[in-house]
Image (tube, grey):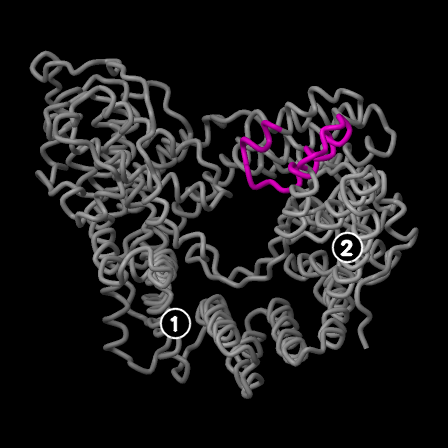
Amino acid sequence: MQRLFLALALAAACKPIPVESTTPAGAAASPDAAADSQLAELARRIDPGPQPPLGELFPGWLKDQFGVASTGEAASDAVVAEAREAVAALDSLDPDDGEGRLRGAVRLGRGIVLAEQAVAAGRSDPELLAALAKGYRVLHALRMFDRDSVFGQDFARAFEVVRAQGVFTGAQLAEGLDALQKAAALAPALQLHATAQLLRAHPDHPTVPNTLGRAAQTQFERQDFAASIELRRRSIARLGQASATDHASLALACYAALDLHCGDMARKTAHQRGAEAPGEGGAALLQWTLKQVDASAEAARRALALAEATGAAELNERGHLLIALGRLDEAERLFKRLIEADPQDARPRTGLAVLALRRGYDVEEAVAQIRAGRELLHRDRSYYEVALGLIPTIEAGALMAEIARTGAAPKDLDRRFDEVMALATEFRAFDPARAAVLELIFAATREGLAKFMTGDFAAGLAVTRKLPAQALALTRKFPEVKDVWRLLFALVPVVPDGDKARALALTPVPEALRTDPDIRLRQVQTLLDIAVRWEDGVALAAAVQAAASLPAELDADTTPTIRATLDAVLGLRGDTAARQRALAGFTALAERQRGKARALALNNAAVLRAAAGDAGAAIKDIERALEAAPGALAARVNLAAFMFAANDRERLPEVLAEVASATRIAGLRLHALAWRAALGDTGHGDPKATRADFKKALAEETGREFFGRLLLGRWGAIDDGNLQVALSHAPDTGLLIRFDVTPAWWLVVPAPTFAALVPAKPPKSAKPH
């Protein structure tokens, strides 16, 4: 999690962003001329009064990092414009770009401080007030600086890294972290005060409806449901044609207030409205939103039905319903009363654990409650789902930290798994299929880790290689359980035989799951991996056929990306029509994506243009890819390939050496070294030495390859994705067993030396014992 440590270090390098000095549109109107008595009254009720600006909370050295404006400049148009743009820029951040988000967070902090200074200096532009309210809302929503949250714990560890590097003193960092935590806690009150200022001064401004909607969400989180409902209704009334999401948000607030009539009316309207975003992705998002509303409606009805309940089981159920609705304080009081009434009952402790997760994801408190209930009675399904969602992850983190510190596996490694193995075994009584998945994962991890840590890579790999067959057996025992299929498809690439891998990827899915979006997607992803990894035309054809009918419930970019990738592979193998479809697909994706995703789409478009003979357009796309993500190493290799073709080769050996050294992708490293060998053949390096470097790298990568075969990219595609098996718990869905497969297929131009350097049948990865 080192990306998080750079928040302050990035601040130190963050300079004011140049902006044009402009007068904001919709200049401040006279409050008297634009009076709105209803909004003025609403502003009075929600306004907590003036609050200390965030800038006053920050120590001097931290203010210096934000580069705040001088007193004379605070009210200038340039400062106001920069403050507004800093908040607006958050909407264009790439959610997958961690460092980009950090830079955005730093820019947001500077923007908020500048906006506060401008308001204090007399500026009351409606856009400025709206941006300030939004900035506060975003700051609070991040919850990055809450000590008890996952983000807060990561951020605290990041501070330790920065301290160790000597960027700031330990005292400065402690002072800064305290200030940032206070800022996040104060943000809701600041947001509501800025919202009230906007409502009083500019009640008819176009920014008012969305500002009211954000204030409604803040009041929902503060559990002031009456205020949330009123704010949401005012927002909807001023939007004119409000969206389904707006009405869904109103319904959620109404159900939280246990107002069924209000909730049912808003819910009905939400269902009647269409998706605001076009395409399959918009429909999928709307479907998900409406599902949340429907669940909330059911929870509210059941909570009301249990209002007079006296039995422990019913009261525990009601507590969980209150959490689901957002009535957290009421749920806490109920669970604590139940513990007082029966200290031997584990169920209310489970409730407090779920509550801790809902409030800022306080994992430490949640685990404490679960372990306190370990020897108590009535450990129900919810108990085990929370326990298994948290404890294995906590223990794995502690184990990895100890291994990193000592360089060796602890002598009591087996004992470290006793708790999670016992939890999985006991979970069988509630969910035998998922318990079997967990037992398989835990047992393999315990056995394999011991072997890997003693340096016996082949023996550890042998444990992993047994898993696909074991997962297949689970699909036969529990054929309609999604998690066993997710496990199988995630494990197929470790099979060291191409035919067997393809057969596993084509295992018939039962009728009940054949239209499930996630299962269909994972099967297509697996077939694509097998096709490119093993250069298997049969698997490629199967992947193309399966991708043609992927369900509409997937997000807007997933299906187009997979189809464009498959067409690209076909196109690079000679299918002109497929190449043209792929080019159109990646071009369209590049227009709506940002950061690394945009770079990938542009890179792939460039390779396809080069394959069609359009070198000039290919270079332009590669340059745009590197503008979107300067660290996109595959794009740098392709740029080197295009420069090689243009006889611009002087600097290429150093560039390619840097890529080969920096990349963690085996295939990309080999392609970079193959291009170095090609340069050697043309007088830019030692041909014998560059070939020796390639041969050495191929042996190294083959020897440490985890999957069944080293993905060389001979078909012109390499995968920069990863596979993670993770456990977590969400209050609304329970235990999540995640097999996160996130492929990122980059097209690469193979060097003319590549085919000669790689054997016709390249070696498989290390042979297990």
Q: Amino acid at mark 2?
A: Asp
Q: Position of residue 291 (x, y in %)?
A: 48, 43
Tell me the residue at 46%/46% (across/down): 98
Asked if residue 344 lies in the magenta stretch, the reply is no
Mark 1 secondary-structure assignment: helix
In this rendering, position of residue 678 left or right of residue 593: right
Mark 2 secondary-structure assignment: helix
Instruction: Name the residue that disc number 1 marks.
Output: 367
Highlighted magenta segment, given as a residue range: 623-651
Instruction: Name the residue that disc number 2 marks.
Output: 693
* Circle 1/circle 2 CB separation < 8 Å: no
Asked if residue 628 lies in the magenta stretch, the reply is yes
Question: 451 or 45: nearer the eye?
Answer: 451
Using the rendered image of the protein, determine whether residue 321 is visible from the camera's viewpoint: no
- The Cα atoms of the two marked residues, 1 and 2, are separated by 50 Å
Question: 663 or 302: nearer the eye?
Answer: 663
